[in-house]
Image (cartoon, rainbow, N blue to C red):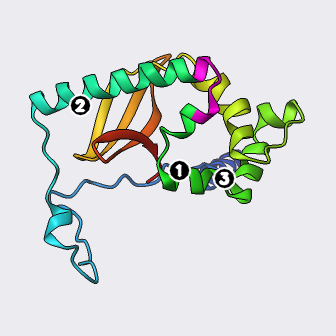
Amino acid sequence: MRILALCAALSLCLSCATREAPREIPSEEPPVQEAPESEPPAAQLEEFVVTEEIYTRTFDEIEDFIRNLNQIIRNEDYDTWLANLSEEYIRTCSEPAFLKAQSEKPLLKQGNIVLESLKDYFAHVVVPSRIQAELNEIEFLDEDHVKAISVVRGTRVVLYLLVRDGGKWKIGVW
């Protein structure tokens, strides 16, 4: 009788035990991917290649641009800052929806700051956050569109999206 009870208890314990899911064995072949509905134009398939000379020259140009921009921001010179913005940046950052979204950010909300214009955005967002911007690297999209990147506490952060406009770098959006 004891043996029967012991077998029943053992059977009950084994049926309640959790089992490890079977492990998948990796396949030697890559997974099959469905073909896209339409192929991108050939120009989009070609990657923009940057020589070391172009990188260095562009880095130096952008470093000078950001150094000057830092001084403009330090001086809180809104009109000169405005001259360094692309038309699209001005249009985008002046939109009420953009200003409202920025006003909802924790630091502004905590300070009860409501942005109503691009000038407010400059005073309450740009000046405090970009006054000491430091360029560490650049990343090209193409010859006229570059990300200015800073490394902050070990993390890469995009400082600016820059666009070359009439041979001059400007802050852009893209």
Q: Is residue 8 above or below residue 44?
A: above
Is 13 placed left or right of 166 in the picture?
Answer: right
The numbered dot on residue 58 is 2
143 or 48, which lies in front?
Answer: 143
The numbered dot on residue 89 is 1
- For badge 1, the amino acid type reads Tyr
Is 18 placed left or right of 148 in the picture?
Answer: right
Identify which residue is drawn at 31% across, 31% down. 138
Identify which residue is drawn at 14% across, 39% down. 50
Q: Is residue 39 above or below residue 20?
A: below
Q: Check disc 2: other Cα within 10 Å, few if <14, some if 14-19, many if 20+.
A: some
The numbered dot on residue 94 is 3
Residue interval drawn in magenta: 73-79
Mark 1–mark 3 distance (CA, rounded to whole Å)? 8 Å
- For badge 2, the amino acid type reads Thr
- For badge 3, the amino acid type reads Ser
Q: Is residue 129 above or below residue 1?
A: above
Please, what secondary structure does the residue beneath circle 1 have? helix
Residue 54 is covered by the magenta coloring = no
**Can you give x and y, in whole percent of width and height, for residue 39 in the image?**
21, 77
